[in-house]
Amino acid sequence: MKILSMAWVGILLAGSLQASAPQQRKTPYWASLGAGQARMRSGPGRNYPASWLYQRQGLPVQVIEVYPGWRKVRDPDGESGWMITSLLSDQRTGMVKDGVAELHETADANSKVSWRAEPGVIGRLSHCKDGWCRIDVGGRSGFVEEAKLWGVDPDETIE
């Protein structure tokens, strides 16, 4: 069994996410940072001061408000502000929160643990159902309990 650490984030960030402006939909909804550098601003416009500079492509964010060409987002630490839509992606990602997450072979707590992921590890989400999500971190994948992730709603289904 191997441990996935923050070093694996670099693999995910090396161009594996494609940026695409998120579709307008009912808030709140999930997106991710589609750019290697993304500024969060205090208002919906480039004339507003930047409050944060993110350097983690793939970081999941929750879109909480919509303004033409801009989205108000909340990050995993609870900070909120505005980002231009071109910096966001529809690619669903999740970040391991609070403690090591075990990645199982199947969506069953009794199945074999293939990997362990440290807090802060980000991966692509797919096949979320019944409290479990398949997560892929640089080609290493497994099923993790939704409760261990930031970037997915409780009991959300993702195909």
Image (cartoon, rainbow, N blue to C red):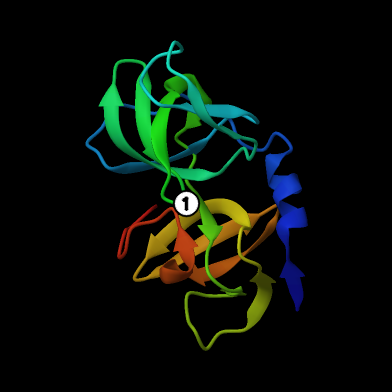
Neighbor class of circle 1 (other Cα within 10 Å; few <14, some 14-19, many 20+) is: some
Residue 147 appears in view: yes
Q: In this rendering, is residue 97 above or below 94?
A: below
Furthest toward the left, the residue is: 26
Q: In this rendering, is residue 63 above or below 103?
A: above
Side (left or right) of 28 relative to 80: left
Q: Which residue is mark 1?
A: 76
Tell me the element at label 1: loop
Image point (74%, 38%), residue name: 14
Q: Which quadrant of the figure has residue 63?
A: top left
Q: Residue 37 location, x and y as percent?
A: 63, 29
Image point (42%, 67%), residue name: 146
Q: Nearer the viewer, residue 150 or 127?
A: 150
Q: Which quadrant of the figure has residue 62?
A: top left
Q: Residue 127 location, x and y as percent?
A: 44, 58
Image point (39%, 39%), residue name: 80
Q: Residue 78 location, x and y as percent?
A: 41, 50
Image point (66%, 55%), residue name: 137
Q: Residue 109 location, x and y as percent?
A: 49, 84
Q: In this rendering, is residue 17 above or below 1?
A: above
Q: Which quadrant is home to the N terminus? A: bottom right
The amino acid type, in three-letter code, at marker 1 is Pro
Furthest toward the top, the residue is: 47
Residue 19 appears in view: no
Side (left or right) of 5 relative to 123: right
Q: Nearer the viewer, residue 15 or 5?
A: 5
